Image (cartoon, helix red, strand yellow):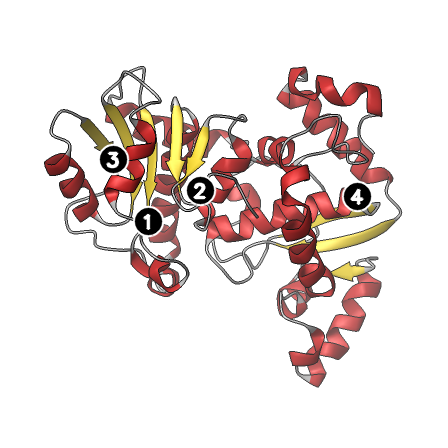
């Protein structure tokens, strides 16, 4: 494990660079190996959250975590490193692109099952994504609360989801520069609240919440009357401005945007997807910097921010307690 028991309570004081170094060092020492595919199926933050759950699962079960991103649905050239700094070894190949999926081997064609057997040998791995994906999801749901933030009563785990979220949320120079330019154009005040109000295809996963349900949670969090809003539907901004005229609402959303659809997003060119990805990353980073964040934990950006942000600085309109 990364840190012995008497070190756990000091985890918050360790720098992000040292956290990464410790994680990478301990990860390399583990005996068995998982190659985990990111960007295989769902939207980016669903993929990111499941990757973080997999990293923790591997830490608890002494499995070396390796990343596969050469078939990622957010890829422009290099996969993960198109946007982020590396945090572990990557194993990418055209063979993995053919056989690494979330769904079980029983649903693959005979040819792909044969190729999958070759992939284990060539890449010296014990597991591919679908071998453990279901177990990882069960693990996350059953252990979410005690693994969310590190504290002495959450033994025997030396890592938590908050720490892993910080380890992976590190951008390469090009992405960081592009994001900072977009954030600067917002001209945000020093103090502001962060809101994520999702519309679009989210209605298929959970009921939509009213703007009042979000604002009711922020009124006691700040004396500021400023909010940055991540939304895929500009009508949300209009509604907020009409309902709360004494507030100033900032957003990257554009007039005419009326809901995100993941399938439609995947039909765009790589260039268009990168532009959209930079805007999304800049939005979530802006929410990370806010005084207090309110979203929904059913939504994957909200779930991720609930991991990334410090304890006590976020809330969900769907649940007061963060859940996986």
How far is disc 4 from disc 3 in space, using C-alphas?
39 Å
* Residue at 81% over, 35% down: 156
Which of label 4 and label 3 is nearer to you?
Answer: 4
How far is disc 2 from disc 4 in space, using C-alphas?
25 Å
Question: Along the horizontal axis of the image, is 138 left or right of 75?
Answer: right
CB-based contact (under 8 Å), mark 4 and mark 3: no
Instruction: Categorize mark 4 by other alpha carbons within 10 Å: few (<14), some (14-19), many (20+).
Output: some
N-terminal of the pair, mark 2 or mark 1, is: 1
Which of label 2 and label 3 is nearer to you?
Answer: 2
How far is disc 2 from disc 1 in space, using C-alphas?
10 Å
Vertical arrangement, residue 261 with respect to residue 45, above or below: below
| Residue pointed to by mark 3 | 251
* Residue at 60% over, 53% down: 69
How far is disc 1 from disc 4 in space, using C-alphas?
33 Å
**Secondary structure under the numbered disc 3 in the rendered image:** strand
How far is disc 1 from disc 3 in space, using C-alphas?
13 Å
Q: Is residue 108 visible?
A: no
Query: Furthest residue to the right?
Result: 31
Image quarter where the N terminus lies is top right
Question: Along the horizontal axis of the image, is 17 left or right of 291?
Answer: right
**Secondary structure under the numbered disc 2 in the rendered image:** helix
Return the x and y of residue 268 as percentages of the image width and height.
34, 60
């Amino acid at each position: 494990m990364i840190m012995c028991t008497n070190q756990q309570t000091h985890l918050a004081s360790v720098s992000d660079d040292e956290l990464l170094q410790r994680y990478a060092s301990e990860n390399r020492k583990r005996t068995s190996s998982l190659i985990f595919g990111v960007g295989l199926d769902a939207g980016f933050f669903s993929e990111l959250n499941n990757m973080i759950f997999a990293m923790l699962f591997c830490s608890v079960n002494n499995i070396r975590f390796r990343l596969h991103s050469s078939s990622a649905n957010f890829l422009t050239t290099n996969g993960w490193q198109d946007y982020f700094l590396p945090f572990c070894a990557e194993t990418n190949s055209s063979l993995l692109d053919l056989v690494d999926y979330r769904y079980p081997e029983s649903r693959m064609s005979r040819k792909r099952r044969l190729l999958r057997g070759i992939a284990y040998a060539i890449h010296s791995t014990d597991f591919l994504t679908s071998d453990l994906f279901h177990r990882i999801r069960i693990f996350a749901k059953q252990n979410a609360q005690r693994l969310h933030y590190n504290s002495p009563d959450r033994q025997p785990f030396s890592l938590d989801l908050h720490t892993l979220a910080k380890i992976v949320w590190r951008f390469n120079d090009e992405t960081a520069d592009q994001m900072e330019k977009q954030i600067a154009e917002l001209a945000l005040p020093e103090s502001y609240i962060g809101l994520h109000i999702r519309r679009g295809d989210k209605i298929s996963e959970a009921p939509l919440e009213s703007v009042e349900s979000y604002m009711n949670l922020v009124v006691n969090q700040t004396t500021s009357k400023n909010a940055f809003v991540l939304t895929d539907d500009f009508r949300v901004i209009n509604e907020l401005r009409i309902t709360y005229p004494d507030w100033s609402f900032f957003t990257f959303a554009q007039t005419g945007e009326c809901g995100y659809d993941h399938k439609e997003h995947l039909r765009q060119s790589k260039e268009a997807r990168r532009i959209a990805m930079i805007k999304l990353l800049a939005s979530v980073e802006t929410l990370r910097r806010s005084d207090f964040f309110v979203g929904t934990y059913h939504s994957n950006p909200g779930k991720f921010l609930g991991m990334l942000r410090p304890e006590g600085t976020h809330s969900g309109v769907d649940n007061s307690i963060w859940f996986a």
